[in-house]
């Protein structure tokens, strides 16, 4: 029997794998921006770190926005969610642009899963527009605009978390 390493077991626990390449991610971010372009204009983009930094850079570039702030939240240790910790909120300057409630601000994250992170940030900025590239059913009601929905038991593997590696043939048990 083939020895399965701990990373493979972690992926099994995480459910159906959905690997996303840089190319695909860029395309999905551009598709998201086409939708957001109909909704704006926005004063600033707020990335939920760290995953939101990548789509926020692409969306900001496409929308011509140069004011970019962050809300720094930590919760997952690989595929296990712990308590949410807000390590940094938005700056006073960005808060002013949003009139204190986030009006005209665009919050961007890579995905919503349970929706816990999105809920926390929405509470901080109730009138902001919340956009994600991917959405799972539990978190989807929190998002104003997203591109691709995946099932709750799917685990999305982002290109910045992965590397090319050998895959066994499908008939030999590859996912
Ligand atoms: O809807 P939820 O169940 O709250 O999960 C979604 C959040 O989880 C991931 O971030 P994570 O906390 O893993 O940090 P990271 O962005 O630094 O990877 C992802 O980037 C979202 O921000
Ligand atoms: Mg995140």
Image: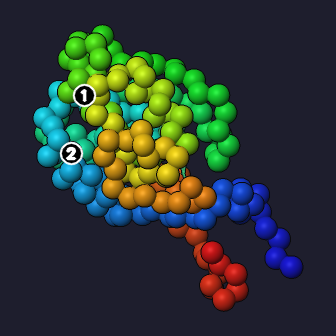
* Residue displayed at 53% across by 60% down: 151
* Residue displayed at 61% across by 58% down: 153
Q: Is mark 1 within 8 Å of ligand 1?
A: no
Identify the secondary structure beneath mark 2: helix
Q: Do the residues labelled 2 and 1 touch (CB within 8 Å)?
A: no
Is 109 placed above or below 152 here? Answer: above
Left or right of 167 in this view: 25: left
Direction right: furthest residue: 1
* Residue displayed at 55% across by 42% down: 114
Q: Distance between the residues labelled 2 and 1?
A: 12 Å
Q: Of callouts 2 and 1, which one flags the residue occurring earlier in the amino acid sequence? A: 2
Direction bottom: furthest residue: 171
Q: Is mark 2 within 8 Å of ligand 1?
A: no
Where residue 22 sits, quadrant-wise, is bottom left
Left or right of 84 in this view: 136: left
Image quarter where the N terminus lies is: bottom right
- Badge 2: few (under 14), some or many (20 or more) residues near its Cα, within 10 Å? many
- Badge 1: few (under 14), some or many (20 or more) residues near its Cα, within 10 Å? many
Task: Tell me residue 127's x, y (percent).
Answer: 29, 25
* Residue displayed at 50% across by 33% down: 117
Q: Can residue 68 be seen in this view?
A: no
Identify the secondary structure beneath mark 1: strand
On residue 15, which mark appears?
A: none
Left or right of 64 in this view: 4: right
Q: Which residue, given by chain and number where applicable, does mark 2 sit on?
A: 36
Is 49 placed above or below 127 here? Answer: below
């Amino acid at each position: 029997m083939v020895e399965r390493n701990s990373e493979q077991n972690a992926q099994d626990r995480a459910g159906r794998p959905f690997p996303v390449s840089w190319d695909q991610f860029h395309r999905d971010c551009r598709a998201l921006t086409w939708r957001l372009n109909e909704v704006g204009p926005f004063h600033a983009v707020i990335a939920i770190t760290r995953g939101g930094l990548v789509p926020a850079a692409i969306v900001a570039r496409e929308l011509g926005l140069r004011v970019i702030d962050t809300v720094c939240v930590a919760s997952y240790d690989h595929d296990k969610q712990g308590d949410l910790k807000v390590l940094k909120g938005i700056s006073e300057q960005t808060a002013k642009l949003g009139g204190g409630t986030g009006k005209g601000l665009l919050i961007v994250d890579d995905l919503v899963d349970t929706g816990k992170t999105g809920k926390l940030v929405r509470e901080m900025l109730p009138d902001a527009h919340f956009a994600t590239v991917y959405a799972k059913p539990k978190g989807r009601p929190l998002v104003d605009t997203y591109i691709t929905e995946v099932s709750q038991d799917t685990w999305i593997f982002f290109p910045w978390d992965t590397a090319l590696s050998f895959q066994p043939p499908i008939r030999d048990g590859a996912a």
